[in-house]
């Protein structure tokens, strides 16, 4: 199978994940800059999560330009990568509330991504 379908599916999932993350942002308690400043941890966490998703999407995009066809095994690795990426909105909300910067799913997403990438590079 050509890479177009896997790329389009991944694009759609990433777009949904980013939408879910932005919908979780709450309006500050008041109209002043100080009220917005009190929400800085939430915004910083959102920004970091957005950048992480963007990096994964960008790398995935470049990876798919290196190959002409995907196998069934590649599709399953991609689904597993998307599974772990789908935890990002949850972890964004969690981190924003508990300010614990350790996110084990990022490690697993990296592991899955490298597992997807290694057969292509080697």
Image (cartoon, rainbow, N blue to C red):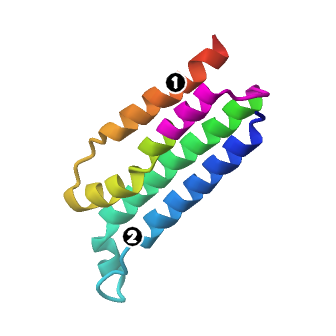
Badge 2 crowding class, 10 Å Cα cut-off, few under 14, some 14 to 19, many 20 or more, is some
Q: First in sequence: mark 1 or mark 2?
A: 2
Q: Does the magenta stretch include residue 78?
A: yes
Seen at 34% across and 56% down, the residue is 90
Which span of residues is magenta-colored?
A: 66-80
Q: Is mark 1 on a helix, strand or loop?
A: helix
Badge 1 crowding class, 10 Å Cα cut-off, few under 14, some 14 to 19, many 20 or more, is some
Seen at 63% across and 10% down, the residue is 122
Res 42 quadrant in image: bottom left
Q: In this view, does 64 lie above or below 12?
A: above
Give the tally of numbered discs: 2
The residue nearer to you, when weighing 86 against 45, is: 86
Seen at 39% across and 71% down, the residue is 25
**In the picture provided, is 88 more to the left or to the right than 67?**
left
Residue wearing tag 2: 24
Q: Position of residue 81 (x, y in %)?
A: 49, 38
Seen at 40% across and 51% down, the residue is 88
Q: Is residue 71 above or below residue 3?
A: above
Residue wearing tag 1: 114
Q: Position of residue 23 (x, y in %)?
A: 44, 72
Extreme residue toward the top, this view: 122
């Amino acid at each position: 199978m050509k890479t177009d379908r896997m790329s389009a599916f991944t694009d759609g999932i990433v777009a949904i994940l980013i939408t879910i993350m932005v919908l979780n942002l709450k309006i500050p308690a008041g109209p002043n800059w100080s009220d917005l400043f009190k929400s800085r941890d939430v915004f910083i966490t959102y920004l970091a999560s957005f950048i992480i998703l963007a990096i994964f999407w960008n790398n995935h995009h470049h990876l798919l330009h290196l190959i002409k066809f995907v196998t069934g095994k590649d599709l399953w690795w991609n689904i597993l990568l998307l599974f772990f990426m789908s935890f990002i909105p949850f972890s964004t909300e969690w981190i924003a509330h508990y300010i614990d910067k350790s996110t084990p799913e990022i490690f697993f997403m990296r592991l899955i991504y490298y597992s997807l990438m290694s057969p292509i590079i080697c």
